């Protein structure tokens, strides 16, 4: 009986030693894999630099911190730089990952440069344990964020969340996507004309998009290393915007070709729609040359309703052209991820 406590203590020591060995091996493997990933990107012609890459969190976590990160893909023109990036996971569940983006995160394309500073900027993802590491579900969260664009000025957001998960029971690369944002303040230069009309306040109270999207490829590690998956079918379950006296509701289905041009129909109900056109024009979402045609088409359709300030119509995209009801208003949108 005297040996029983010694046996128990020995077992406890063995467990701790074994777990400690597992953590050391796992943490070093994590660092080796990440460092190898950067080396592979440099071999492909990327800019892929960092100052330090360290893993901590013993005994229950693999928390990796990368400092002075600088990534740039010459083929797509997309770049990302940050003072720090953290990848956090439990040591016994390494395929459930939390990514943290502290400090100023700078993203650039060939057309724009966007910096994001936020009190909260993080993402979480569940990955399938395979070479490709496909995402089964993910959530991106922002809070108290300042987003500065070289093209569109400064946007402030109180809170935003983007969630994506594989759609149950659907074949192919199909995902349910939900985006919600509240307390959105656009750059004053984009909304000056509409704000002067009194229809809108400085703050968009809420915007919400819910959709089921089929992509041409899975969202996995190759979405970063090679190219972003592109949408091919978009089922808009609901799009809503509440902004002072402006409200927008939309549903529809779009099919997106290999060239990014959309075909399909979207049913739209918009209150105070003229101000929406003005804002879209100021933001560069509608070319100046199309504003007149869009306004005339809206007025014609709105006169058919009891309220000329409410537009209840179908946007149709066909053969590269856009129609508001039966009236042509310009080119169909191009939907393509950079």
Image (cartoon, rainbow, N blue to C red):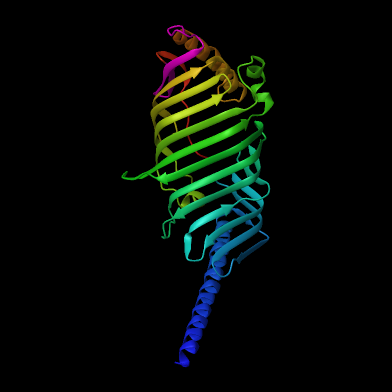
How many numbered discs sit on the rendered protein? 0
* 127 on left or right of 62: left
Q: Residue at x 67, y 16 (%)?
A: 196
Magenta span contains residue 39: no
Residue 20: % across, % down: 54, 76
Residue 141: % across, % down: 56, 44
In this view, the residue farthest toward the bottom is 2
Residue 116: % across, % down: 65, 42
> Against 118, is 249 above or below?
above
* 8 on left or right of 78: left
Figure quadrant of the N terminus: bottom left
Q: Residue at x 50, y 82 (%)?
A: 14
Depth order, front residue of 215/84: 84
Depth order, front residue of 4/252: 4
> Against 153, is 222 above or below?
below
Q: Residue at x 62, y 46 (%)?
A: 120
Say whether residue 175 is visible.
yes
Say whether residue 43 is visible.
no
> Against 202, is 85 above or below?
below
Magenta span contains residue 313: yes
| Magenta-highlighted residues | 303-324
Residue 219: % across, % down: 44, 48
């Amino acid at each position: 009986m005297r040996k029983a406590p010694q046996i128990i203590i020995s077992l406890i020591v063995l467990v701790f030693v074994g777990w400690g060995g597992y953590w050391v091996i796992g943490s070093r493997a994590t660092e080796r894999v990440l460092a190898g990933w950067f080396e592979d990107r440099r071999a492909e012609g990327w800019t892929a630099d960092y100052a330090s890459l360290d893993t901590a969190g013993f005994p229950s976590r693999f928390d990796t911190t990368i400092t002075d990160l600088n990534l740039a893909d010459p083929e797509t023109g997309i770049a990302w730089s940050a003072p720090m990036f953290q990848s956090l996971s439990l040591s016994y569940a390494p395929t459930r990952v939390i990514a943290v983006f502290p400090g100023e995160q700078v993203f650039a394309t060939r057309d724009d440069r966007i910096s994001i500073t936020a009190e909260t900027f993080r993402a979480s993802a569940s990955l399938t344990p395979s070479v490709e590491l496909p995402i089964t579900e993910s959530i991106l969260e922002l809070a108290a964020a300042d987003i500065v664009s070289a093209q569109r000025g400064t946007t402030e957001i109180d809170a935003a969340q983007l969630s994506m998960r594989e759609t149950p029971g659907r074949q192919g690369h199909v995902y349910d996507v939900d985006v919600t944002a509240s307390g959105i303040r656009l750059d004053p230069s984009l909304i000056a004309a509409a704000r002067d009309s009194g229809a809108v306040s400085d703050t968009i109270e809420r915007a919400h998009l819910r959709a089921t999207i089929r992509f041409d490829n899975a969202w996995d590690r190759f979405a970063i290393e090679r190219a972003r998956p592109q949408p091919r079918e978009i089922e808009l379950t609901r799009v809503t915007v509440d902004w002072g006296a402006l409200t927008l509701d939309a549903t529809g289905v779009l099919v997106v070709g290999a060239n990014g041009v959309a075909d399909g129909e979207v049913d739209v109900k918009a209150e105070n729609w003229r101000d929406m056109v003005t804002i879209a024009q100021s933001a560069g979402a509608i070319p100046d040359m199309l504003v007149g045609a869009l306004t005339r088409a809206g007025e014609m359709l709105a006169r058919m309703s009891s309220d000329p300030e409410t537009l209840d119509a179908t946007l149709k995209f066909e053969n590269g052209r856009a129609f508001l009801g039966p009236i042509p208003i310009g080119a169909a949108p191009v939907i393509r991820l950079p």
